[in-house]
Image (cartoon, helix red, strand yellow):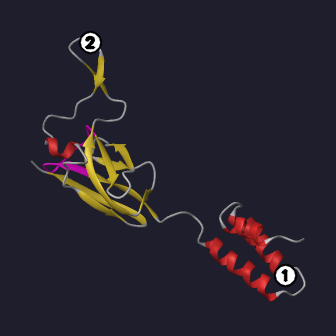
Amino acid sequence: MNMSIGQISQIAFCRAPRDVAWGHAMRLASFGSGCSALKQAVLATAVILTGCGGPPSGAVSGIVRFEGKPCGDSAVVFMSLETGASSSANLEPDGSFKLPKRLAVGEYRVYLSPKAGAVSHGADGQPAPAPLPSSIPVRYTHEASTDITVNVRAGVNEFSVDINK
């Protein structure tokens, strides 16, 4: 069984599941003509492989309150200041939320938007996006005007977002 360095590097960059790649690396390290440089390269590749999993990220959940009361009639949006990537979740009646996907580590602006899937009907009877409650100050409804920022860290993140007039 002979593999080129290119094939070994493909294993190192997550082209195979971790345990399968580790098994390949161990077989390669014990195989061959005693070439210690190749064995070292294979073992180094296996070490790199254990860190393969993408950039650090965090799970985000929490509660949103307006004037101290749960804000359950909207959605919360987290938008990266670095990349512009965002994730949102509808707020539960008690104001709690859990974002559906992990966020990359970094700083995010937090603002409110209408609940996903919520519609209202205009004066002409046509469907229109549901508005946010009129009591929510406009500055908390857009990433450019909100002053709420949070730092997402690797692991579990629990945020309490308090909005006041």
Given residues 46 and 20, the one toward you in this image is 46
**The magenta stretch spans which residues?**
64-74
Residue 162, by quadrant, is bottom left
* Quadrant in which the N terminus is drawn: bottom right
Q: Does the magenta stretch include residue 89?
A: no
Q: Eyeballing the image, is 103 above or below 100?
A: below
Given residues 45 and 58, the one toward you in this image is 45
Q: Residue 96 placed where, x, y %?
A: 31, 49
Q: Eyeballing the image, is 117 above or below 23?
A: above
Q: Residue 41 placed where, x, y %?
A: 73, 80
Residue 128, by quadrant, is top left
The residue singled out by tag 2 in the image is 125
The residue singled out by tag 1 in the image is 30
Q: Residue 107 placed where, x, y %?
A: 32, 61
Q: Say whether disc 1 or disc 2 marks the residue closer to the N-terminus.
A: 1
* Number of numbered markers: 2
Q: Is residue 63 left or right of residue 27?
A: left
Which residue is at the far top?
124
* Amino acid at pointer 1: Ser
Residue mark closest to the camera, 1 vs 2: 1
Q: Eyeballing the image, is 152 above or below 51?
A: above
- SS class of the residue under badge 1? helix
* Amino acid at pointer 2: Gly
Image disc number at residue 155:
none
Q: Residue at x 54, y 63 (%)?
A: 54
Q: Residue 83 placed where, x, y %?
A: 38, 55
- Within 10 Å of the Cα at label 2, are there few (<14), some (14-19), or many (20+) other Cα atoms? few
- Within 10 Å of the Cα at label 1, are there few (<14), some (14-19), or many (20+) other Cα atoms? few
Q: Residue at x 31, y 64 (%)?
A: 151
